[in-house]
Amino acid sequence: MKKVIAKNLGLGVELAIVILVPIYAGFELDNYLGSSPGFFIFSALVSTGGFMKVINRVQNQYKKELKELEDERRR
């Protein structure tokens, strides 16, 4: 049970980092250079790509685990 909680908590932290760090960096870079909103928009797109990559990885892991469970039941 603790493994499941740790795994899901880790996923939440990973998603927060993937989304917030690039957006914050783009926002701060825009403030520093005065180039608003160029870097912010770019960083939002990077965050979206990272989010999609994490979700795709989680989905593939779930499919793999589900397939393993089905294979065990058939034995």
Image (cartoon, grey):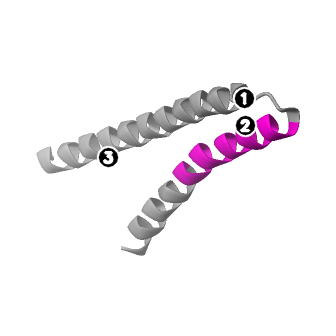
Q: Give the camera-side residue of 69 and 28.
A: 28
Which of the numbered marks, if any, corresponds to residue 26? 2
Q: Mark 3: which secondary structure?
A: helix
- Density class for disc 3 (Cα within 10 Å; few <14, some 14-19, many ≥20) is few
Q: Of label 3 and label 1, which has the lower sequence position?
A: 1
Q: Dots 2 and 1: beta carbons under 8 Å?
A: yes
Q: Earlier in the sequence, mark 2 or mark 1?
A: 2
* Crowd rating for badge 2 (residues with CA inside 10 Å; few <14, some 14–19, many 20+): many
Instruction: Please give left or right for residue 46 compared with residue 51 in the image.
Output: right
Q: Position of residue 74 (x, y in %)?
A: 12, 44
The picture places residue 10, in percent across and down from the top left corner, at 52, 60
What type is the residue that disc 1 sits on?
A: Phe
Which quadrant of the structure image shows residue 8? bottom left
Which residue is farthest left?
74
Q: Amino acid at mark 3?
A: Glu
Judged left or right of residue 70, residue 40 is right
The amino acid beneath tag 2 is: Gly
Give the magenta range. Answer: 15-32
Q: Residue at x 59, y 33 (%)?
A: 44
* Residue annotated with mark 1: 39
Relative horizontal placement of residue 14, taking residue 59 as reference (left or right): right
3D distance between C-alphas at marks 3 and 2: 37 Å
Residue at which label 3 appears: 65
Q: CA distance from mark 3 to mark 1?
A: 39 Å
